[in-house]
Image: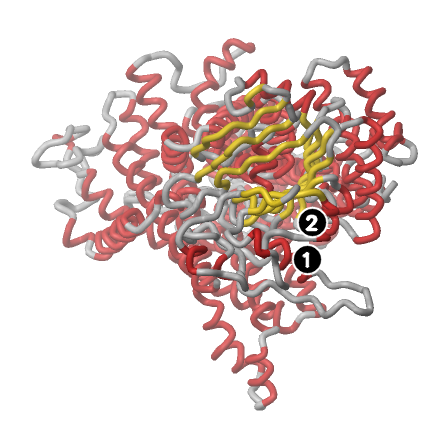
Amino acid sequence: MSTLRIDREAADGAIVRRPGFGLLRALRQGPLFAGAAAVLVLLVLIAVFAPLIAPYDPDAVDLTATLAGSSSEHLLGADQSGRDILSRVIHGARTGLLGPLLVVGISTFLGIAIGVAAAWRGGWIDAMLSRSMDLIFAFPGMLVAILFVAVFGSGLTAPVIAMSVAYTPYVGRLVRSIAGQEKARPYIESYRVQGWSGWTICVRHLIPNITPTVLAQSAINFGYALMDLAALSYLGFGVQPPDSDWGSMINEGQAALLQDAMLPSFAPGLCIVVAVVAFGIVGEGIADRVAKRER
Amino acid sequence: MARYFLARFLGLAMVLLATSFLVFSAIHLAPGDPVTFLLKGHPATPEAKAAVRAQYHLDDPFLSQYAQWLGDVCAGDFGRSVQFRQDVGALIASRLPTTLFLIGYAALLIVLAGVLLGIVAALRPGFVDRFVLIGTGVATATPSFVASIGLVSVFSVKLGWFPTFGGGQGFAGRVEHLTLPAVALAFTLSGLLARVTRSSMLDELAREHVEVARARGVAETDVVRRHVLRNALGPIVTVVGTMIAGLLVTTSIVETAFSVPGVGGLLVSSVNVKDFPVVQAVTLLTVAAFVLVNLVVDLLQPLVDPRLSPTGRGAS
Amino acid sequence: MAFLEIDELTVRLPQGRAARPILDGVSLRVGEGESVGLVGESGSGKSVACRSVLGLLPEGAAVSGAVRVGGRDVLGMRRAELRSLRAREVAMVFQDPRASVNPMRRVGDFLTEGLRAAGTAPAVAARRAVELLEAVGIRDPEGAMRRYPHHFSGGMLQRVVIAAALAGEPSLLLADEPTTALDVTTQAEVIAILTRLQAERGTGMLFVTHDLELAAAVCDRVYVMYAGRIVETQTAAGLFARPRHPYTAGLLASTPRLDPDAGPPKPIPGRPVSLAEAPTGCAFAARCAQVRPECLVEPPALVRADDAYAACFRVDEGIVT
């Protein structure tokens, strides 16, 4: 959850591995990483080709199939409106992955821009940008997202903007510290002596050199962003019905639970857990590889 | 020392001021006219319009509106709920005990389960350690609302041990109603805490002074308690603090899942029906509590680690 | 019978973690009140030998031989016996006082911990701790009891560690490089305190160090270790006058001297044998100037030469340095 900021102090100079998966390292020798990566590729393929794969229209209501169990017709059964759960889960992968992708994309971009600016310019610019990031850290990201929804209305936009802002300091702090180290290296000085502009050096040399480390952090953030956005969607603040989303499917399926129909809420729940575990393993794996190469 | 405290409290005041400004100006940031926004979903009678204009001093210049609103808030007047037609302060006060009970209950479970599992994993390398690692790995990837549906389906629907919704009355009633929500809240975080405890314990177990204590004939249980666990407490306290601060927000998810009549559930339902005075008040109070918990954790650190204490330096 | 007897102690790490034993047939004696040095380079096994006296052995190690304290075998002791041995009879002073004292607990707690573990009443233990702090030269002992380790300098903290070691009135003190981590000026003070208290109380001492000169200054007798084996033992004076093993001679020759007529220090060529190597013959052969073919075939046993013992095939020929 974005509201958990463990290892905050350690953020300078190291990837913040909120300790979800760091210790899985012992178990992640090869096959686990490969398996997790395969799961992610599969998820992406499912999301991209959802309309082709899904056996039914995810929004097609069939009241004769209300709360049908698993059958050859509906592999994962049907929900209270008789909509095919498998099709909804497949389509749900689209928003389920698109939201975190936007959050991670925006926060990575902003984080690199802010972090490099702070490290490169130093002085009052650094002080101002660093204090602003500290201030954002002082807010619980999820709460800001809820406030945004209250003001701008529900949908994907408000949560994505709020979570992007909340995740930016994670990337920004990391970039600031490693860009600072990189800036002190002799090769940067030699480019300057040759008369290259600061902008060119940053874009052509400094940023590409720090990218692997930043990507590792972003991959770890992806899993957490997915969990946060799914939670917002569960609360009804995300994608609005009838569009399918894992979080909102759990919300809708909860009532069916009392009628002993587990699939409507369990199927999307399992998807979230699997996706988060896979992103955690892959993110940590990349982080380890980067750390090994640095050494 | 005094300067440190002063700086921290100033920082706290700054964050609260920034939050209040953000929360207040939100009504002007929202698309459309503030009056319509504040009355969304309710009949915009001239009387209602006038009441809202008066409550938010909308006829004054912006900064003056903010100053008057802030003054009211500091005096404990958060305005009136559109949804419940009731004073917001009283509304929150009536729901606060349930939420605090839930957070306290969950925090207790997190600390008990997390620290115990972490200790066991650290002291029993091999099978037990691996088992705990895998279990907590899955737990940390399970969001509280997914844990909620699992718990409801097993313990309420299948076994019928616990009710599926409500807050309960009295201590026993609260325990009965809030056990499943507290477990759901604690599920993810206790896994996280177990991992933090384990790695912190392993760091300390490898220290030479632990070996020294053994070499001096101190019994193993005392070595673990007085030297390993005691010294591993620093990261554990920090993490528990951030977790409790996080619970202030995640409780809204679980309160929604179990229809617990608490402050978190109130926030969610108020967002859904656009009851903005309530959203403002709950947001402000939650941020205040969040920052305060973080501050308390920072102030606790010197008690946990005497090396961080700013007083009493100098060699003898 | 000596108070401490180590007999043919061999310690092997589990397969794959080391090619040779860390300790290979080590035998060693420390009498009542006697002060004995154990000298070797890092990795020679001297610390492992020292810790074995407390029954502290590397995890998973295979052990043969015997360690007897006051006639009782330490390696066969049960937990409770071992605890009482550690709390009452044998105490240890470690290399780095910063690392060996728990930074989160008060100094008084550290001093009395061993006594309390052995069942002494807290008030009695505290009184005794204050006496000992005074004896090791710490000003304001009562105040010091309430302070934390980070309030002390390294030298002062090592005095605290010595006081703590003496708290249980042990008959044997193990000192594992007690001054290596300290500044040169404080080293002399700490050694002075250690030897004074040891002599006053009649405590036996096993003094482990890499510094042959220091060992000779502190101890009556010195054992020299190389690659897990004892290669030479004799009196401190004899060692300087006539080293019997080429390694000892090399160590002496490699120490810089201030005498105007002494030549420049001569380092021993090569490097110590790591745990990954298992030479068949004498472990020192690769670095030895007097090496002969038989040295590479099997390791020499300790043989008597006058008052000394040395593990060298050429012990009778004398050493030309």
Q: Can residue B248 be seen in this view?
A: no
Check whether the beta carbons of the residues at disc 1 and disc 2 lie within 8 A of each other: yes
Give the x, y percent position of residue A80.
Answer: 22, 30
Q: Mark 1 points at which residue?
A: C252
Give the x, y percent position of residue B15.
Answer: 68, 47
Q: Mark 2 points at which residue?
A: C239
Describe the element under mark 1 as helix, strand or loop: helix
Distance in Å between CA atoms under marks 1 and 2: 9 Å
Residue C123 falls in image quadrant: top right
Chain to which mark 1 belongs: C
Give the x, y percent position of residue B148.
Answer: 38, 28
Q: Residue at x 43, y 32 (%)?
A: B125
Question: Tag count in the figure?
Answer: 2
Question: Is B253 placed left or right of C150 in the picture?
Answer: left
Circle 1 residues within 10 Å: few <14, some 14–19, many ≥20: many
Give the x, y percent position of residue C205.
Answer: 71, 33
Question: Is A27 placed left or right of B124 in the picture?
Answer: left
Question: Is B87 placed left or right of A206 in the picture?
Answer: right
Q: Which residue is drawn at 62% across and 24% down?
A: C69
- Looking at the rendered image, the disc whose residue lies closer to the viewer, 1 or 2, is 2
Circle 2 residues within 10 Å: few <14, some 14–19, many ≥20: many
Is B120 situated above or below A16? above
Chain to which mark 2 belongs: C
Which residue type carries mark 1? Leu
Extreme residue in the right direction: C140
Front residue of this view, candidates B98 and A211: A211
